[in-house]
Amino acid sequence: MPEDRPSTVDEHVERILGALTPLQPYDQPLLEALGLPVCEDISAPMDLPAFDNSAMDGYAVTFDDVVTATEDHPVHLPVVGEMAAGQTKLFALSPGTTVRIMTGAPIPQGADAVVPVEWTDGGVAAVRITRAPTHGQHIRRRGEDVQTGDVLLEDGALLGPRQLGLLASVGRSQVRSRPRPRVVIISTGSELREPGTALGHDSVYDANSYMLAAAARAAGAIAYRVGIVSDDPEEFSHALSDQLVRADLVVTSGGVSKGQYDVVKEALVELGTVEFGEVAMQPGKPQGFGVVGEDATPIFTLPGNPVSSYVSFEVFVVPAIRRMMGRLPYRRPLVRAITSQGFSSAPGKRQFVRGLFEIDGRGAHVAPVGGHGSHLVGDLAEANALIVVPEDVTRIDPGSQVQVLVLDRDF
């Protein structure tokens, strides 16, 4: 990013996406692939159901034997056996007899209907049937759901609970998909302290690393939160080097402005592989992006103020994580809503205003939450959306339609 002109948000996003490639896919256990796109076309290797089976607990019968059954004129049949799901013994049913059968059990040869137990007296040696089924009723036929060769999932389909259940149903224990990116989170600042420890008069608790690690997990990544790194470039460089072995992507917060103790910028600028500059946005103006280490691991250097850091993560890092997983769309879609309050916006910058979004009988609405300060983490926690104000808009009036980036939901 050139220093003389801030990049736009869209320019910075496109630069990031253009520098990244999806991770290489491999076969993973089914549950490990939850929420990831499948990287193969999958056809059914078998029929579902794999055999004719009973849809009810009841009695397998020959239809012609029970077609006349009514309350006034019941049919009586001898019970010659019992079949439960998972039972290997097979029956061949003779006309004039019946077999007790449980849900999921295979249909005996010669049976062409199942009488639910509720239509009988529940007899064990003999049964009284008071209602006739239709021909084939309560039988799940082989292949009526899925037939061998059917396309179950196409390359790129998202693997959710139902899709994984389908794969397990046809005997698949693994599926080819891209791994979750391993994201290392590093907070810098000599003033930072771990939650649960004592604070000094000039220290603050490290909220950013917890917030960003949680955001990375919510985006589908594996997050590794690193302990606090002080304002010492050498210490930061050592910590970063140690973490690269387990990182597909690194995110730092703090130390990227123009101050004397901007440790991240000082340590990385000499590498020549990380560019620092400004993005025309508020909050989150100072940004850095590039690669580090022998494997050219992508690194995001985010500002240290909590709101700036979180907004930057949502706008820039979430699309990167989704690209590495191969999940589309990369960027969180914007929705339209009516704002209940008016507010001003700085000219020339894309403003991300914390908001409370809801949908009711009147449609989608959003209300600004708190002030614009990038340190107001209480307001950030109350918000569930970001109101996105274009660079050329300086005033939003009450009742205006605005674009909203809704947080905390999949897309």
Image: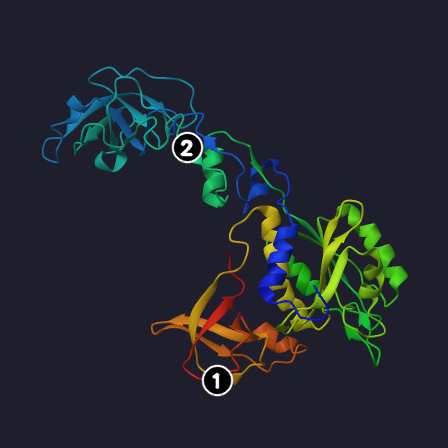
Q: Residue at x 40, y 28 (%)?
A: 85
Q: Residues within 10 Å of mark 1 (few under 14, many from 20)?
A: few
> Compared with residue 26, is residue 111 higher up or lower down, i.e. above or below?
above
Q: Residue at x 55, y 54 (%)?
A: 330
Q: Is residue 300 visible?
A: no
Quadrant (top left, top right, bottom left, bottom right) of the N terminus: bottom right
- Image position, residue 132 (x, y; %): 16, 31
Q: Which residue is mark 2?
A: 151
> Compared with residue 379, is residue 240 higher up or lower down, i.e. above or below?
above
Q: Give the residue furthest to the left.
A: 72
Q: Amino acid at mark 2?
A: Val
Observer-nearest residue: 246 or 77? Answer: 246
In the picture, the disc for residue 342 is 1
- Image position, residue 133 (x, y; %): 19, 32
- Image position, residue 120 (x, y; %): 22, 34
Residue 304 lies left or right of residue 199; in this view the side is left
Q: Amino acid at mark 1?
A: Gly
Secondary structure of residue under mark 1: loop
Secondary structure of residue under mark 2: strand
Observer-nearest residue: 311 or 125? Answer: 311
- Find residue 289 and report its image quarter: bottom right
Between disc 2 and disc 1, the foreground one is 1
* CA distance for labels 2 and 1: 52 Å
